Image (cartoon, rainbow, N blue to C red):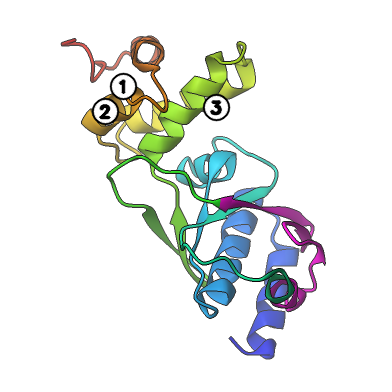
Amino acid sequence: MDRKKIQSALADITAEQDPTVKSLKLASICSSLWAERGVELVVVGGSAIEILTEGAYTSGDLDMCQTTATAMPIRDRQEVMGLLTAKGGPRNWEIAGMFLDLLGPAESFARTPYRQIRAPYGTVLVMKPEDLLVERILVSVYPEKNQTARACAQILLSGMLRGQIEVDWDEVRRLAKLPEYRNFADCKKLIEETANELKIKSPFDSD
């Protein structure tokens, strides 16, 4: 991407008033610039939930990880982010009024693919919703009850149960029973509670 296009995109992102659209635009140009250097990025955590729920949940910043095994050297990272007139680094930057955190290698145990979302400056990869749900429910309970994480999980669940976010419920079950999570009972409970509130049949009703 040439400097003229980068500057045009940066001006557009800076002027964007919708926080979710702003996050998606920033993720798209960062993904494109890093991909030119052989590194694939994916939006994770609350930022991914914000994009998947189209702003029903807002995270306030942008969290990304790399899916490729090879990391970009620190100097190269700073040079790439410098194209966006970013401040800070080498893992946290302020760009166009937003904070971007690069959290290292992506942790995913789901067998489903990353979600691909078309955005103005390139395709954005988003963490698998099955991973996001099971992880957020775990955080809502351990090491102590976390109402913020629970509310976030319920917003994501609402989109899943209504069919607005495609999800593989068998994969959710498999993930929650993995040694890495071991929280199937907590997942089943919150899914059933949320389904009852929405007056929708729980995908785990037959358990």
Q: Quadrant of the N terminus?
A: bottom right
| Secondary element type, mark 2 | helix
Q: Are marks 2 and 1 in contact (CB under 8 Å)?
A: yes
Please state which amino acid type lies under the numbered disc 1: Lys
Between the residue at mark 2 and the residue at mark 1, the CA separation in whole angstroms equals 5 Å
Between the residue at mark 3 and the residue at mark 2, the CA separation in whole angstroms equals 21 Å
Left-right relation of 1 to 54? right
Q: Quadrant of the C terminus?
A: top left
Task: Kindly identify which residue carries mark 2.
Answer: 174
Few, some or many residues within 10 Å of mark 2 (<14, 14–19, 20+): some
Residue 161 at x, y = what percent? Answer: 32, 27
Residue 36 at x, y = what percent? Answer: 53, 80
Residue 103 part of the magenta segment: yes
- Disc sitting over residue 152 in the figure: 3
- Front tag of 3 and 2: 2
| Secondary element type, mark 3 | helix
Please state which amino acid type lies under the numbered disc 3: Cys
